[in-house]
Amino acid sequence: MLRIDFNGPVRVGCAIDTVSAPLKLYVKTWCPWCITARQYLAKRGFRFEEIDVEADRAAYAEMIRLSGQSYTPTLSVDDKLLADFGPDELQNFLKKHQIEP
């Protein structure tokens, strides 16, 4: 991206594309890792859809189809997926894929 500041020198930089697509967080409500993931995302201002896979068997089947496993939490955004994770993996995943609130 080229930005011209008419009051000063020309600055050249590039914009970094970030992802702000809807996040889907597949959870089991009693799962401690799911609770931590929910708190992590909420505390940092992420908007996400929380899907209780125990209450919705179709969502559970969809999570398994997407991730190839039955563990929670599972996070889906666009075509990116993170399954069976803790806070460190979540932080790295969001940073790697430039996913921001």
Image (cartoon, rainbow, N blue to C red):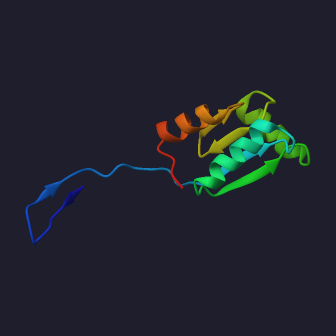
Q: Pick the quarter of the image with the C terminus.
A: bottom right
Q: Residue at the location (69% across, 43% down)?
A: 37
Compared to residue 53, the image places residue 1 above or below, namely below
Q: Residue at the location (79% across, 40% down)?
A: 62
The total number of labels drawn is 0
Compared to residue 25, the image places residue 1 above or below, namely below
Viewer-nearest residue: 90 or 32:
32
Percent x, y of residue 69: 77, 27
Viewer-nearest residue: 79 or 89:
89
Percent x, y of residue 59: 83, 45
Residue 5 falls in image quadrant: bottom left
Q: Residue at the location (50% across, 50% down)?
A: 19
Percent x, y of residue 75: 67, 41
Compared to residue 33, the image places residue 3 above or below, namely below
Q: Is residue 7 left or right of residue 25?
A: left
Percent x, y of residue 80: 59, 39
Q: Is residue 37 left or right of residue 7?
A: right
Residue 90 falls in image quadrant: top right
Q: Is residue 15 left or right of residue 98?
A: left
